[in-house]
Image (cartoon, rainbow, N blue to C red):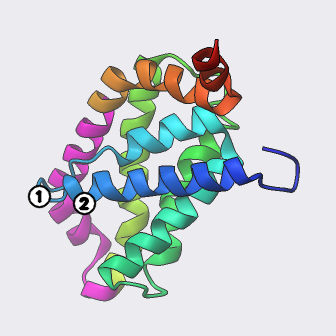
Amino acid sequence: MQTGKLSTKDIVLIGVFAAILLVQKELLAFIPNVSLTVFLIVLYSKAFGEKKTLFILLVYILLDNIIMGNMGLLFVPFQYVGWALIPLLLCTVFKGVNDPLRLAFLSALFSFLYCWIMAIPGVIVMHVSIGAYLAADITFELILAASSFVSVLLLYKPCFRVLSALNTGTAARTRRS
């Protein structure tokens, strides 16, 4: 990505990868808290960097909330912060972590962080204590953390190779050769 400007390719990729986030979420919605969301955000963060991933997340969250009819100002900022922590941390504090096993453990941590951030508007809406909310949500938090861990562990390495090639244009040059 050029400094300060998004190329046409960047805009298209942002739209496509935001759509992938949305579609996988909807396809897996019948299984509570099992999704590839954390895996995809980890993958995007490592393959595309912080800025592109933050744009992907912005588009994804806006589309998700428009489609679900939940554009409430209470949830959207918390949702964005919860997901944005992944690229922010992976591109700064955990920049040197590229091993799938370590990324899998981080993805489990990110799953819990997201759930805990989303507990704030949940507590406000439901008028319950944070302790009661977290106690009721722990099973779902564990499921999200487990699905994130397994998906990163199994899918990160092969998917990263493909996205890295796409991001650098290597895939296009290789096909032409």
Image quadrant containing the C terminus: top right
Residue closer to the observer: 97 or 8: 8
Type of amino acid under label 1: Phe
At horizontal 60% and vertical 32% (from top left) the residue drawn is 47
| Neighbourhood count class around disc 1 (C-alpha, 10 Å): few under 14, some 14–19, many 20 upward | few
At horizontal 59% and vertical 48% (from top left) the residue drawn is 13
Is 141 included in the stretch rendered in magenta?
Answer: yes
**Based on the displayed image, in which of its 4 quarters is residue 171 positioned?**
top right
Image quadrant containing the N terminus: top right
Any part of residue 146 in sight:
yes
Q: Which residue is mark 2?
A: 26
Q: How many angstroms separate mark 2 from mark 1 (CA)?
A: 8 Å
Q: Is residue 33 left or right of residue 164?
A: left
Q: In the image, which disc is placed on residue 30?
A: 1
Label pair 2/1, CB-CB below 8 angstroms: no
* Residue range of the region highlighted in magenta in the rendering: 125-149
Residue closer to the observer: 64 or 162: 162
Q: Residue furthest top?
A: 177
